[in-house]
Image (cartoon, coloured by chain):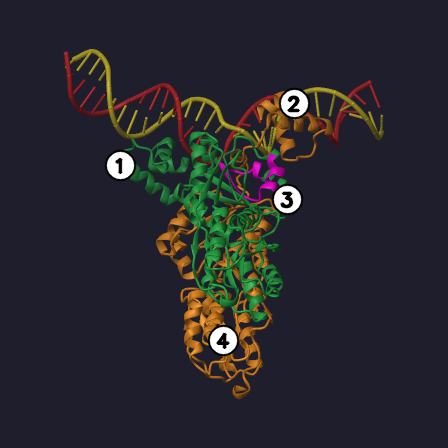
Chain colours: A orange, B green, C yellow, D red
Amino acid sequence: MADVARLAGVSAQTVSRVSTGHPGVLESTRREVLNAMQQLGYRPNSAARALKRGEFRTIGVILFTLATTGNSRTVEAIAAHAAREGYAITLIPVAVPTQDGVLGAFTRLGELAVDGIVVIMEVHLLDAADLTLPPGVPVVVVDSDAGDRYPVVDADQAEGARQAVRHLLKLGHETVWHVTGPDESFSSARRAQAWQEVLEEAGRPVPPCEHGDWSAESGYRAGLKLAARPECTAIFAANDQMALGVLRALHEAGRRVPEDVSVVGFDDIPDAGSFTPPLTTIHQDWAEIGRRCVQGLLEQINRHTLRPGTVLIPTALIERESAAPPPADQRQ
Amino acid sequence: MADVARLAGVSAQTVSRVSTGHPGVLESTRREVLNAMQQLGYRPNSAARALKRGEFRTIGVILFTLATTGNSRTVEAIAAHAAREGYAITLIPVAVPTQDGVLGAFTRLGELAVDGIVVIMEVHLLDAADLTLPPGVPVVVVDSDAGDRYPVVDADQAEGARQAVRHLLKLGHETVWHVTGPDESFSSARRAQAWQEVLEEAGRPVPPCEHGDWSAESGYRAGLKLAARPECTAIFAANDQMALGVLRALHEAGRRVPEDVSVVGFDDIPDAGSFTPPLTTIHQDWAEIGRRCVQGLLEQINRHTLRPGTVLIPTALIERESAAPPPADQRQ
DNA sequence: CACCCTGATGTTTACGCAAACATGACGCGC
DNA sequence: GCGCGTCATGTTTGCGTAAACATCAGGGTG
């Protein structure tokens, strides 16, 4: 910076003013400084800047994996909105989803240069890490029911599941079978619970769940079992990937979709419209989730207020071709 | 830090020595300091640390989107390996894939606290941004042919495509039709080129390409056209998502896979094994790509040497059920 | 017993920047 | 024409840390 100041014939402070876009610098001076910067290839040192200002303009995102569509889409949206506000994103992946792994990530995080944290993580693991969550650091949590302690942003899992089940019921199916996600997932539990509630409210039998792990392969295994039951005419899979596996299982078992069996997924991943047949599913607005995360975090950073509570992002039923009325002989 | 020093009855320097794990501190003193740290909730300020040490222990990753499996997997692997080396990852998404967008990202990047950069981006857009790439900053490029100027890490696109085409030829198909990715993609161009070369070497006719954009929907459109050609018995799609669309199109057109038409994809996304039918495809080792990116970057950071050149990660043919010999009447 | 060496700890300093305050030039009003 | 306000710019200072150097105590050696 001193070199730039010398070359431009001004003081270091004026260089600083130019680089931060401060007002009160003569246009001619500004141009001269800019020129000198260019010539010397000057780049402000962000460490020094952060030290002086006491903020990093960076948001940390802690998660298990980018491999799920939801996570990577959410991160992408967070990054995009953060960038718009002048914030960068630092990724803190948790190598292993154990309490130790989470603890390690939170420890690293404590030493990281972040002004706030988005936690995309199942709540029970968050609990374990709770102790080491640096107090006073703004936090927003996704995919959790910790709304009483932290600001939570999430898709309206329950309403989405209700939309799916009601849609199948309205088509005339007597009941709806369910393929769940992993037990430890909050989203999975929420979707399963809502599925059960809708059936009970409608006075329909609640068939036993098949348990999956979000993967298409697990959906395939569940689908094989369901395909073997002739009374099963409607399946709600807790995500689109498992629905894909269910579709394959039904196809192999010779049961046509949607003529014999209807399938509804959850997520509306980009490929869902190209499944065979195109999948009727529940759309999640990840872009909006990311936006609200950033918004909530900035609110805390700027206003120094932690406001627990849950922000629910609406879901939407996307009707494609995998759900239809049940076969005539099974119709209500 | 001063408070900790006071509480522990030592100097600030000793606190620093403890927090950096420096040797030459009496065990009893160390414990006392650790104790005081805990009590006061002391966390070293990473900005000050970075300022003093002249390094951020952070790697920037600049990319267009996390929406493709390849990108998000690569980023995840980069993050995991970087974490192992004590580096964090900062994400710099390019909002719009235009030269302006890229320029903007590189400008932001210049001000970012990173010790090195991984660029996951098509090369022609990189060229446009070239001017503003801060000189002297370690860089590794993925998905590019800029091996003469930068260290490049990439899957062996050409060999992968060759494996796919040769596999179909060996099964007895007279030739192989191709659904490409977007024109501006280096990977897409490389795969298409290798496809053509293999056909020419084998003395087979080279049918016209169908052009897609990586999306399943574009694969569906291409598949519809291909399905209308009875002479088409083998299709190589430049990625698995487009292959999914092709599968759907063939199914709708009443052409069975693999009995009537064989399909091979590229990527081996996690769902590929659950397509209907399970997709034969080319596996890319994204974890290894991420690992080599970090390795290449750290080499530059530690040894201050820029070594242009391309590291090619081998691909592997994964045989599943979507490719088989052609129908008897079409057999060679 | 004086010397030096070693190892533990304290003191000084600078990293690069920007806030706060200081300076100085100019113009305007009474 | 004197004083005061305004605006552009310069000077001082300190953010939290760790490297470099300084100090000091104890122990072994000739």
**Residue name at image x 39 percent, y 53 percent:** A102
Residue A183 lies left or right of residue A295; in this view the side is left
Query: Quick one: label 2, few (<14), some, or many (20+) residues within 10 Å?
Result: many
- Which percent across, then down, holds residue A221? 41, 70
Query: Observer-nearest residue: A24 or B241?
Result: B241
| Alpha carbon distance from label 4 to label 1 | 63 Å
Answer with the quarter of the image where residue A253 lies.
Answer: bottom left
| Alpha carbon distance from label 3 to label 4 | 44 Å
Do the residues indicated by labels 2 and 3 lie within the same chain of the protein? no
Mark 2 or 4 closer to N-term? Answer: 2
Query: Quick one: label 3, few (<14), some, or many (20+) residues within 10 Å?
Result: some
Find numbered disc 3 in the image and state the secondary structure of the residue it sits on.
helix
Q: Which residues are magenta?
A: B109-130
Marks 3 and 1 close (CB-CB < 8 Å): no
Marks 1 and 2 close (CB-CB < 8 Å): no
**Which one is in front in this view, the residue at disc 2 or the one at disc 4?**
4
Amino acid at circle 2: Ala
Q: Which residue is mark 3?
A: B101
Answer with the quarter of the image where residue B321 lies.
Answer: bottom left
**Which one is in front in this view, the residue at disc 1 or the one at disc 2?**
2
Find numbered disc 4 in the image and state the secondary structure of the residue it sits on.
strand
Q: Which residue is mark 4?
A: A235
Amino acid at circle 1: Glu
| Alpha carbon distance from label 2 to label 3 | 30 Å
Amino acid at circle 3: Gly
**Which one is in front in this view, the residue at disc 3 or the one at disc 1?**
3
| Alpha carbon distance from label 3 to label 1 | 54 Å
**Quarter in which the N terminus of chain A is drawn:** top right
Q: Which residue is mark 2?
A: A8
Query: Observer-nearest residue: B84 or B217?
Result: B217
Q: Which residue is mark 1?
A: B27
| Count of numbered marks | 4
